[in-house]
């Protein structure tokens, strides 16, 4: 994905801080992940971007807008009726264009597969270096930019990006 390359090229270490839990010192990523630190940081940044912008870049059908619908039904004035009839119009539009549904679903599935791949990069690389990483985005909705790093079941660091 072009966005992934842009994230990778856009200053890999920019805005990524790893802090020790015990001393509050900044830990160089190479200390934790060896020569694999760049791929871990890039994957973490992609996960963060995906968390901030779910399904960004996925195919979206060119569904007629509300404005287009209003042009076809200029006599509708009641807001509730406009909304309900537009919803029925969109439902019918998708029935008439089943290929668009398949394209949207396929695009979303590919996005999800690529997102899962980034998590696997992080988790597998951590395991290779005797670490376990826990993404905090599932615990609290405002924590998708943080990861806890564990060694031997003890939390040793937190990554902020």
Image (cartoon, rainbow, N blue to C red):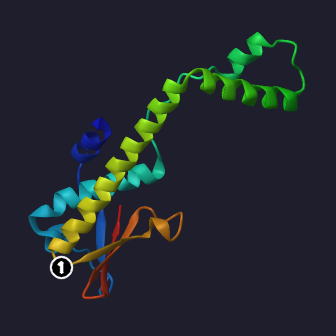
The image position of residue 105, as x and y in percent, is 47, 38
Residue at image point 30% right, 66% down: 17
Residue at image point 61% right, 20% down: 96
The image position of residue 22, as x and y in percent, is 31, 88
Numbered marks: total: 1
The image position of residue 107, as x and y in percent, is 41, 36
* Element carrying mark 1: loop
Which quarter of the rendered picture does the N terminus lie within? top left
Which quarter of the rendered picture does the C terminus lie within? bottom left
Q: Is residue 157 left or right of residue 103?
A: left
The image position of residue 71, as x and y in percent, is 75, 11
Q: Is residue 95 left or right of residue 50?
A: right
Kindly identify which residue carries mark 1: 130
Closer-to-camera residue (79/15): 79
Q: Quadrant of residue 15?
A: bottom left
Q: Quadrant of residue 145?
A: bottom left
Residue at image point 24% right, 49% down: 11
Few, some or many C-alpha atoms within 10 Å of disc 1 (few <14, some 14-19, many ≥20)? few
**Residue 14 showing in the rendered view:** no
Closer-to-camera residue (155/88): 88
Given the current orientation, which residue lies at the most extreme right position?
78
Q: Quadrant of residue 127?
A: bottom left
**Residue 88 showing in the rendered view:** yes
Looking at the image, is 18 positioned above or below residue 62? below
Residue at image point 80% right, 13% down: 73
């Amino acid at each position: 994905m072009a966005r992934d390359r842009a994230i990778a090229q856009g200053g890999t270490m920019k805005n990524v801080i790893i802090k020790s839990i015990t001393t509050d010192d900044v830990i160089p990523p190479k200390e934790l992940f060896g020569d694999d630190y760049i791929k871990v940081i890039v994957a973490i940044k992609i996960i963060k971007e995906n968390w901030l912008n779910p399904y960004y870049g996925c195919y979206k059908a060119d569904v007629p807008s509300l404005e287009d619908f209003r042009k076809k039904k200029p006599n509708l004035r009641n807001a509730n009726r406009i909304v309900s009839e537009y919803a029925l119009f969109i439902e019918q539009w998708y029935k008439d264009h089943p290929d668009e549904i398949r394209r949207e679903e396929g695009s979303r599935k590919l996005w999800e597969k690529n997102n899962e791949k980034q998590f696997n990069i992080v988790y597998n690389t951590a395991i290779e270096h005797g670490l376990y990483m826990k993404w905090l985005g599932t615990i609290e909705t405002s924590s998708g930019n943080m990861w806890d790093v564990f060694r031997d079941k003890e939390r040793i660091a937190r990554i902020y990006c």
